[in-house]
Amino acid sequence: MSGLTAVIQGVGTSDLPRAPQLSALGHMLQASHRALADARLLPGDIDGFMCAGIQGQLFDDVVTAADYAGLRPDHLNGTMTGGSAFEFHLQDAVRLVESGAARHVLIAYGSDLASNRSIKLSFGAERGGRPAGPMMWDSLSGLTIVGGYALALRRHMWKFGTTHAQLDEIARSARLHAARTPEGVLREPLTEDAIAESPMIADPLRAIDCCLVSDGGAAVVVSAIERIDRPTPPPIYILGTGCCQTHWNIGQSDEPDVTGAGRAAQTAMRQAERVLQDIDILQLYDSFTITPLLLFEDMGFCPKGEAGRFVSDGRLRPGGALPMNTDGGGLATCHPGMRGPFLVVEAVRQLRGDAGQRQIPNATTCLVAGSGGILSAIGVGILSKVPR
């Protein structure tokens, strides 16, 4: 290492949660331009570029995306682990800037998933839509993405007695945060009638347990603080990162209700020289209500099987002891196919004090955890407004 310190210098999002006038590429470019403006940088300043796209969209090819963005980078990374790809990118960006190999790295994503309904999401599928690899066996039973998460939840319910009422608290919390967010979609409180009427999607997951389908783009600029000429707005320190993949398709998982979040979080916390009690706010992937529930347990916030009780006291809500997904998350504000970069953007805005009505007072340190595939690839970052 060269002794340099990695920080997030700029963030940006595209028009959320729906902008039918923009293509997936348009969302990525708009978010990238806004992140560069936030960082007081020009495209020519970027010497590292990382992105990942939804299958079948133009910029699956990171080279093509860089070309459209007007970049001429020395380093490219198109690692694709689903929704957590951008936390994997964050880990690699830190290594690049702290080694001195890159000055400024742009991580970007865009999707028009809500407006362009021709897009089909399928893990392990070829371009023609036919399942490939291990997914060909899972698909014989009609297993879908949501079905894989339903299997994990059903196992958790069977082993630990987890209830729908406990999952409801995660959905309720998301809507309370969304109500304080200008881009929030599901802004009304979740009523008992709405819970009772929520249709079953993949037993035991109901509609209220599932993320939104939206458009959107997000971008993050990672720099070495020693190479920032004008540190305005205040840079956010990346204290530690950790990543882990345990499987891809749910049929390859040893334990469907156990993720690699423990390994990823331990690595990130060790680098950050922090403990879980130092965390003020959380930005956790919430593709389904079961996702943050498992992340809580596997990262060590509570023992295995006790996350249902852990979330039931309102600690995740605005004003709670451990606010989670303060922009409303994927359940209530924005989930354009992959949510990983939005977790980082919201963390930065909270730590800067730029979150407006949803600002959490005195937030110093945030844990970000992305989940890709079907609880398959977990990426964790520890961000802070103070250095290590």
Image (cartoon, helix red, strand yellow):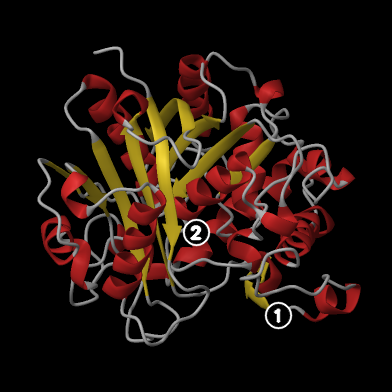
Nearest the viewer among 345 and 195 is 345
Would residue 123 appear left or right of 351 to someone viewing this image? left
Q: Position of residue 178 (x, y in %)?
A: 70, 65
Residue at 72% x, 36% y: name it.
305
Is residue 294 something that shows in the picture?
no
Would residue 151 appear left or right of 69 to someone viewing this image? right
| Above or below, comparing residue 196 to residue 76 in the picture | below
Nearest the viewer among 117 and 355 is 355
Residue at 11% x, 57% y: name it.
63
10 Å crowding of disc 2: few (<14), some (14-19), many (20+):
some
- Which label is found at residue 235? none
Picture quadrant where residue 281 is located: top right
Q: Position of residue 304 (x, y in %)?
A: 69, 31
10 Å crowding of disc 1: few (<14), some (14-19), many (20+):
few
| Above or below, comparing residue 49 to residue 289 in the picture | above
**Label 1 amino acid?**
Pro
Q: Position of residue 107 (x, y in %)?
A: 31, 49
- How far apart marks 2 and 1 lie (CA) works out to 18 Å
Task: Name the residue beneath numbered marker 1.
Answer: 199
| Above or below, comparing residue 387 to residue 144 in the picture | above
Residue at 31% x, 18% y: name it.
4
Nearest the viewer among 203 and 329 is 329
Residue at 45% x, 21% y: name it.
267
Task: Name the residue beneath numbered marker 2.
Answer: 148
Picture quadrant where residue 293 is located: top right
Would residue 70 appear left or right of 306 to someone viewing this image? left
